[in-house]
Amino acid sequence: MARVLACGLGLVLCGLGGNIAQGEDPTPIAGEEFRTTLFGEEIYVPPRDRRSVTAASFGVQAIPNGPSQMEMLPFGALYVWRNWDDDNRRLRGTFSGVVNDVDYTIGLREYPNWSLIFTWDNFILPMGRSEYVQGQRQRGTELEWSYAFAGAGLGYRLPVHPFRQDSAVNMSLTYEAGYRWFKGTGHTSAQYGVPKDTYEGRIHFRIRADALKRNLMELPHEGFTMGGDLIHGHRAKWDRWGGAPFDTPDFTKEQTYLQASAYALVATGLPFIESEKHRLVTSVHGGIGKDLDRFSAFRLPGRPTGYEWEAISLPMIHGVAFNELFPTRYAVANLQYRYEALFFLYPYLEATWGLVERPVFTSNGAVKNITDSMPALGGGLVTGAPWKSQVELNYTYNFGIYRDPGGAPPTKGGHGIIFFWSKEL
């Protein structure tokens, strides 16, 4: 069993220091050979080619008294990463059927570091989705709305320390041609206007800089990563839509919008402690937009878990249902302390503070947007599991999120639990 646990792997997931305490086994690094002794048994983890990864994941998010339809939410995806032909071709894809995200890169041999990039991004869900105010579902706003975008452009890649397969600065500029389509449901209010289907074109600049060293569980061990996105979008057709309880949108402005986001993460050891077993992971995410609406606003949280180089770019707020919040501006900071109890077992504690725009009810029952704080405390465990798999369990209490106890006024504060399982195929 110990040998199997040693091979537990995660799905998605320039050193800044950290000395090894005398007599302490070094932390196993992702992809590298590792030998140790556990409970008197010799353990050997063979080297692994991280340039080729196929993995599947499944998870469940539980939010007691959370938004209706989202109190118990399953999620899952297939992750594919290929980096071959001397770093000249790369493919990254996450596939779940409803949501799919693909980047394919072809290097230009005559121009080293430059490449052609082709992208695909879609969200297609043939069922109604409502918005929520202070945890309460606004059924009259329910719409079926989906989108699909195909992009092409130019990219630049520069390998950086520690020169692992994901250690690089990646920049790209793409044009994304897409289509959005909408449909009312039986719950949509007669006074709530359904948007018209439309072509939408986006210019997307993206930068990612990853200089992280990751451990056996693909968790950040030391180093940093940072990046950002800038999106300019324009819809060919955009007429009056929406309605109560929200203010009627200014469709003439929202036909063209601008969205910018950035992030940074640093992994280090603890000050004055010469041990690799203690890790401090600090991250910040922020975003702001101009003329954003329900369909172009940020969606928080953007991911359940994971520290793969692209997944890190998405903000994570535990204790909040996926996509529950739709701000035009936000800032989120997270501080995590993680301990290596065994080479495959990593318990952690974390604190999060968010400043997020969100809708709230006024005294007369209307809705207005405010920018409010969302502190949270939690902890969890990441561990290897049988059959080359990995499990993460997280519990968080979010002091700032609104919850609906049912029949009573919304209250601040709520619990969140995530169970996440992933397996390399």
Image (cartoon, rainbow, N blue to C red):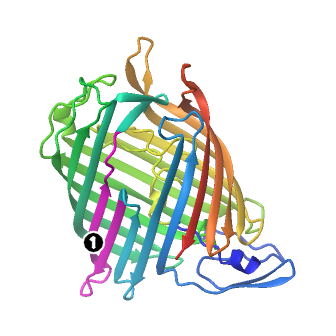
Q: Residue at x 22, y 34 (%)?
A: 194
**Residue on which the image places disc 1:** 117
Q: Using residue 166 as the reference point, say whether residue 412 is left or right of it.
A: right
Residue extending furthest toward the left: 236
Q: Quadrant of residue 116?
A: bottom left
Instruction: Say if the magenta span includes residue 104.
Output: yes
Q: The magenta stretch spans which residues?
A: 100-128
Q: Is residue 107 magenta?
A: yes
Q: Work out which quarter of the rendered image holds the N terminus and state it.
A: bottom right
Q: Does 229 appear above or below 154?
A: above
Residue 193 visible, this angle: yes
Q: Amino acid at mark 1?
A: Ile
For the question of whether residue 215 can be seen, the reply is no
Residue 18, by quadrant, is: bottom right
Q: Quadrant of residue 217?
A: bottom right
What kind of secondary structure does the magenta stretch mostly adopt? strand
